[in-house]
Image (cartoon, rainbow, N blue to C red):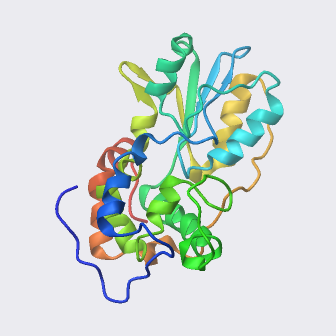
Amino acid sequence: MRGRWPQPPGRRLPAGPGHRRGQRQRRHSGLGTARLAARAVIVSDERRALFIHIPKTGGASVEQVLRETLPDARTVGKERHPRLRRALQLDPGLAPYWTFGFVRNPWARMWSWWSMIDRWNRRLGPASGKPQTETDGTRAGNRLWRAVAEYADFEEFVLRGTEEIPRLAMTQRSFLHAGGKEADFTGRTEHLARDLAVVQEHLGLPVVAPPRRNSWSKGPWQEAYTAASRARIAEVYAEDIEAYGYEFR
């Protein structure tokens, strides 16, 4: 972490003990590699295919379709959202498999990520005033959600979160390449149904429209940004912006 941030006036503080800044900073150090029992990569050995699920890119919808249409669908490891490099470490035999994933406009993605966590925080998390636990689950969230709940607003989530929480600063491209191997197909969340159809046709699967899952953000995401937060996303996700041609629009 580079530097310290002053606490803004009127900041919302989570309920319960153990939320002081020093404790928060120590907990954040391991968030980038936390293991949680949730979604993982999807593998089909019959079709020699590997799906890498990048957070907040429509992956839950893609995963549901794959599980329903691939009888042999399996996962690798127990990590939440492992990158391609990690998947190959866990199962080197996947290296020749046809690999695919989906990416999203970085500014829209971060607003969606914040909206999802903030909704949980207000309904069930520290901001709700309800008793909190450290056990991962639907009600308690996970380590990432509990850490993000300590930020006062979206601005702080962007400016501080990308400094303090490694997971928030991982570029999408870093999920889809490992050494000399790149994803064979990169779809766009902005055209999820169209690009998922490309995957389905390549794998010889019926073309099924993806369900709408985990859609939390409301209103134009552009309105959520200040000049500072907009510039911060451009800096952190410069690799994605260059690789996939995204703009702030």
Residue 40: percent from left, percent from top: 61, 35
Compared to 195, does 206 lie above or below?
Answer: above
Compared to 148, does 7 lie above or below?
Answer: below
Residue 233 appearing in the image: no
Q: Which residue is drawn at 75% across and 42% down?
A: 64
Occupied quadrant, residue 115: bottom right
Q: In this view, does 214 lie to the left or right of 56?
A: right
Q: Residue at x 67, y 47 (%)?
A: 60
Q: Residue at x 61, y 68 (%)?
A: 120
Compared to 210, does 202 lie above or below?
Answer: above
Closer-to-camera residue (223/152): 152
Closer-to-camera residue (89/198): 89
Occupied quadrant, residue 128: bottom right
Compared to 243, does 126 lie above or below?
Answer: below
Q: Is residue 245 left or right of residue 35?
A: left
Q: Residue at x 76, y 39 (%)?
A: 65
